[in-house]
Image (cartoon, rainbow, N blue to C red):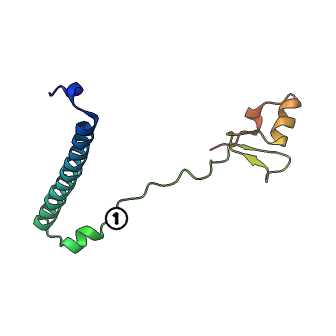
Amino acid sequence: MQDLSKYSLAKLRALEVQVDDALKTQHFLSISKAREQILHIARNAGLTDKQVLAIKAPVPAKAGAASVGYTNPDDPAQQWSGRGRQPAWVKAWIAAGKSLEDVKTSA
């Protein structure tokens, strides 16, 4: 490894540009090589380039809404997942000395 401490700022900046250019070139070459390898494998499997390029990566499902964990027995339309802030009916239920287990939705 070279001792860069003796280099001037201008020389270091020039090296920085050269390194950046080399990194971009190597990155491009590695992607090109990988693409050619993938296409080669696909062709050997009987796929055309067009078919391979049309393949889309699967999109992971979004987290979405949490499932219902608790239901108000006095008003089944009032439900709570058990995450986030407790709704008023849950607070009132607990304040009345009742257990959340009594309103837990069976899954």
- 93 and 52: which is toward the camera: 52
Residue under the image location 20 percent in, 46 percent down: 18
**Label 1 SS:** loop
Report which residue position mark 1 lands on.
56
Split into 4 quadrants, where in the image is the C terminus?
top right
Report the side of 22 relative to 99 (left or right).
left
Residue that appears at 14% across and 61% down: 36
Q: x, y (%) of residue 71?
A: 76, 45
- State which quadrant residue 15 falls in: top left
Asked whether, in this view, residue 74 is left or right of residue 100, the answer is right
x and y, in percent, of residue 39 in the image: 16, 64
Nearer-the-camera pick, 95 or 39: 39
| Image location (x, y in percent) of residue 80 | 73, 45
Residue at (73% x, 33% y) in the render: 101
Residue 31 position in % (x across, y down) = 21, 55
User: Which image quadrant is residue 12 in?
Assistant: top left
Q: Is residue 79 above or below residue 85?
A: below
Residue 90 lies in quadrant = top right
Q: Residue at x 66, y 42 (%)?
A: 106
Q: Nearer the viewer, residue 80 or 74?
A: 80
The residue furthest right is 96
Figure check: 57 above or below 71: below
75 lies above or below 57? above
Question: Relative to residue 75, is residue 16 depicted above or below?
Answer: above
User: Callout 1: 10 Å neighbours few (<14), some, many (20+)?
Assistant: few
